[in-house]
Image: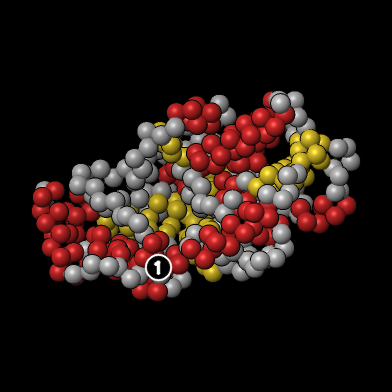
């Protein structure tokens, strides 16, 4: 095989932005991907005329106009606004926590009434120094909001009781005393018409791509194939877990086609009761205001991670942060390798932050050219 300027491991958003920018600068790129498709976790596939987010809902939102302008070079975005709802037993509430939530919960109308109920509940609890996530949440939002909308959902996400989770996981819980169901405060928000996969295809046009290709197997026979490597996989895996594995949470998806035109009336419905095994149901057609005769839904189940399972969310507690710093320092001894993305940098990134981080990596590389 020919020699390249960059071997890019992973065809997700970070790798695709990096590849696009480097090719614009005249650099050659080989991209390898262990899955059988492009686009990493933002991959969308068409089912029954519906763009299905195979690895969970991805709603683009940002307050950074330069990032918004950048992503709009590759797709036309619609005006979708994320307004999830939560189901607790037979009760339905709007998210985020706002006056629609409080009005339904307590039968009140004004912000003053809602603030008083929450303040009274917090005062009655008398928690001065929260010792765990449960006490931290209770001290921020009171008992009703915590019990119905936080406790069960959080325990499913983390796989353990809130009383056993550290308090610092929740630094704040936004309470909005307006009748506004828009989940994000960002200035720009939407879903690309036709899905995310097309964006990646446009970004990496001109690169050589190998799918179904594991880096660790591939590199054994191609050690000198590129001047530099961009690695967007897990940094601990890159170093063969020499300090031990970092912790992640994983997600399992159950997707099915239903013979109805509208299953739940909303793209995102959270199930906050602990007894319901899944955390939420996504109805994909609503992201693009679909009118198809059938619908596609995905149930999401949070699960423990172990080596060999797909990692999704870094567990950024004190122990893992310290362990990641050891891997980051080890990475610094490899000037031929750039570590990027949520797994390479062990950080939960929204999509706009991924783009910004990838562009920064490009700028850092460009400075090195000089």
Report if residue 25 is visible in the image.
yes
Report if residue 198 is visible in the image.
no
Q: Nearer the viewer, residue 232 or 168?
A: 168
Quarter occupied by residue 11: top right
Question: Does 341 sit left or right of 9 as displayed?
Answer: left
Horizontal and vertical percent position of residue 259: 47, 54
Quarter occupied by residue 183: top left
Q: Nearer the viewer, residue 35 or 51?
A: 35
Horizontal and vertical percent position of residue 17: 62, 35
Q: Is residue 174 above or below residue 142?
A: above
For label 1, the residue is 166
Q: Is residue 201 above or below residue 119?
A: above
Q: Nearer the viewer, residue 354 or 80?
A: 354
Horizontal and vertical percent position of residue 56: 51, 52
At 49% from the left and 45% from the top, the residue drawn is: 350
Viewport quadrant of the C terminus? top right
Question: Does 170 sit left or right of 191 as displayed?
Answer: left
At label 1, counting other C-alpha atoms closer than 10 Å, the crowd grade (few under 14, some 14-19, many 20 or more) is some
Which SS class for mark 1? loop
At 75% from the left and 29% from the top, the residue drawn is: 27
Viewport quadrant of the N terminus? top right
At 34% from the left and 40% from the top, the residue drawn is: 185
Q: Is residue 88 above or below residue 198?
A: below
Horizontal and vertical percent position of residue 5: 79, 35
Q: How is the image coloured?
A: secondary structure
Q: How many marks?
A: 1
């Amino acid at each position: 095989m020919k020699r390249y300027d960059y071997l890019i491991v992973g065809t997700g958003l970070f790798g695709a932005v990096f590849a696009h920018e480097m090719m614009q600068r005249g650099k050659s790129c080989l991209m390898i991907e262990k899955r059988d498709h492009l686009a990493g976790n933002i991959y969308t596939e068409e089912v029954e005329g519906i763009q299905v987010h195979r690895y969970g809902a991805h709603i683009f939102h940002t307050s950074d106009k330069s990032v918004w302008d950048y992503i709009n070079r590759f797709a036309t975005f619609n005006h979708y606004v994320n307004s999830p709802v939560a189901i607790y037993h037979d009760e339905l509430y709007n998210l985020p926590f706002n006056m629609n939530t409080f009005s339904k919960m307590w039968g009140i109308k004004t912000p003053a009434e809602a603030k008083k109920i929450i303040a009274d509940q917090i005062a009655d609890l008398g928690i001065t120094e929260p010792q765990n996530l449960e006490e931290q949440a209770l001290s921020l939002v009171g008992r009703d909001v915590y019990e119905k909308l936080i406790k069960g959902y959080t325990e499913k996400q983390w796989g353990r009781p809130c009383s056993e989770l550290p308090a610092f996981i929740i630094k704040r819980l936004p309470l909005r005393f307006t009748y506004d169901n828009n989940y994000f405060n960002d200035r720009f928000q939407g879903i690309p018409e036709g899905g995310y996969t097309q964006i990646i295809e446009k970004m990496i046009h001109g690169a050589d791509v190998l799918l179904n290709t594991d880096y660790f197997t591939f590199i054994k026979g191609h050690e000198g194939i590129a001047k530099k490597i961009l690695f967007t996989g897990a940094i601990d895996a890159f170093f063969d877990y020499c300090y031990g594995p970092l912790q992640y949470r994983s997600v399992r998806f159950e997707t099915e086609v239903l013979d109805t035109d509208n299953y739940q009336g909303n793209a995102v419905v959270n199930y906050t009761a602990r007894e319901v095994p899944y955390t939420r149901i996504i109805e994909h057609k609503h992201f693009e205001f679909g009118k198809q005769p059938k619908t596609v839904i995905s149930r999401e189940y949070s699960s423990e991670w172990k080596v060999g399972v797909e990692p999704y969310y870094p567990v950024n507690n004190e122990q893992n942060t310290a362990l990641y710093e050891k891997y980051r320092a080890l990475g610094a001894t490899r000037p031929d390798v750039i570590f990027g993305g949520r797994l390479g940098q062990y950080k939960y990134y929204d999509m706009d932050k991924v783009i910004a981080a990838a562009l920064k990596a490009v700028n850092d590389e460009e400075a090195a050219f000089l």
